[in-house]
Image: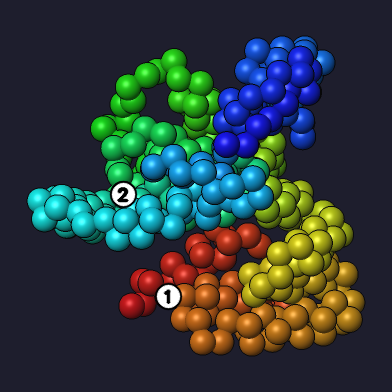
Amino acid sequence: MRQGTCFDCGLTTSIGSFYSFNGKTYCEPCVWKAAREARDRGEPADYVSLTDHSICARCGKYSGDTADHPLVGVLPLCGDCSPRVTNWPYPTWLKAALAGLLVLLLVALVHGRQYFHAGRTMYIGERLVEEDKFEQAVPYLQETLKIAPGSDKAVLLLAKAALKSGNVQVAATALQGHSGGKFENGKDPAFVEVRALWERALSAMGKAEQASKLAKQEGHAAEAARLMHEAASSYPEALGLAAAAELYDGGAAFERKDYDSLLALARRFAKEHPGPQATAMVASALACKYAATGNSEYRTESEETLRSAERQVQGDPPAMEYFQEYAERIRHRLNSREIINKQEYDRRFRHREEQKN
């Protein structure tokens, strides 16, 4: 058998009694000492035992001083033992048991596939939440809950991702659909965090609803704008609240007859949120400027902008219906040079049309 010599104490004996550490050979007591000293220095302290490949692991046959037995797996085996091990005649009962285990494994994999999928989607969703990619996390966590609706962790992750991306409805569906909003541990940090987010979002949505009601009433545009700004400030994750606050600022400017501010606000909103509604707002503000000044340039630009908005809603029936109602008021303003709000216009003209019908 092969011999080895300890680097530290010089002990010489069978190579199988030694260990390799940092590229050097040690006996057992010396490797413990060397590893401890390395650990104290903050260095790696892992070592491995050495194998004498000249000794057959099955029969102990020595291969000589210069040659090693070939490895079968991790074991050195001589020429006689190697084929016996690789071609070992396993008994029938063992083969049958293995076949049975494979069948059971296959059944488990088939039935458990959906749960593996749920685990994978929750892992991806959780990672995205940790990276503050909340909007991207939502669909993965929704997929998780389709398979595991009772998971507290998945519900709380989805609610957090939804609230952090401004999607209160998705959060509400997740929380209220989970055992009626009940969770096992009310002191769980994840639950406490989501509850704080939920209460903040709910408060902001309450103010936004108040603002919406006020905006429909005459003489309350400024108050509506103030409430919507408060909602947007307390829940900035909901980008729609900030956009609504800009719209309500326009309503407040219209109410106080500040048409220069109204036009500036409309142009800025159209630049930040392009679309037919924003384009029509610019046309409305230009019509106000024309009605107030008589400057035909404002009328021309208003009519061109209105035609642009009409082109944008083609093929979208709901948008077209809204546009036609809005455009009707704008054209009245251009034709009469009279600036009246929606409530007054409805009283004068739409109510009359309804009575005729």
Label 1, residues with CA under 10 Å away: few <14, some 14-19, many ≥20: few
- Residue with the mark numbered 2: 115
Residue at the spot x=77%, y=34% of the render? Answer: 23
Residue at the spot x=58%, y=81% of the render? Answer: 313
User: Disc 2 residue type?
Assistant: Tyr
Residue 248 in sight from this viewpoint: no
- Residue with the mark numbered 1: 353
Q: Secondary structure at mark 2?
A: helix
Residue at the spot x=46%, y=44% of the render? Answer: 61
Residue 59 in sight from this viewpoint: yes
Q: Locate residue 267 relative to residue 56 in the image: left or right.
A: right
User: Disc 1 residue type?
Assistant: Glu
Label 2, residues with CA under 10 Å away: few <14, some 14-19, many ≥20: some
Identify the mark nearer the N-term, 1 or 2. 2
Q: Quadrant of the C terminus?
A: bottom left
Question: Considering only vertical position in the picture, is 37 above or below 246?
Answer: above
Q: Nearer the viewer, mark 1 or mark 2?
A: 2
Which is nearer the eye, 344 or 116? 116
Where residue 145 sits: x, y (%)?
Answer: 35, 47
Q: Quadrant of the N terminus?
A: top right
Where residue 217 sits: x, y (%)?
Answer: 55, 47
Residue 260: name its quadrant: bottom right
Residue at the spot x=58%, y=61% of the render? Answer: 342
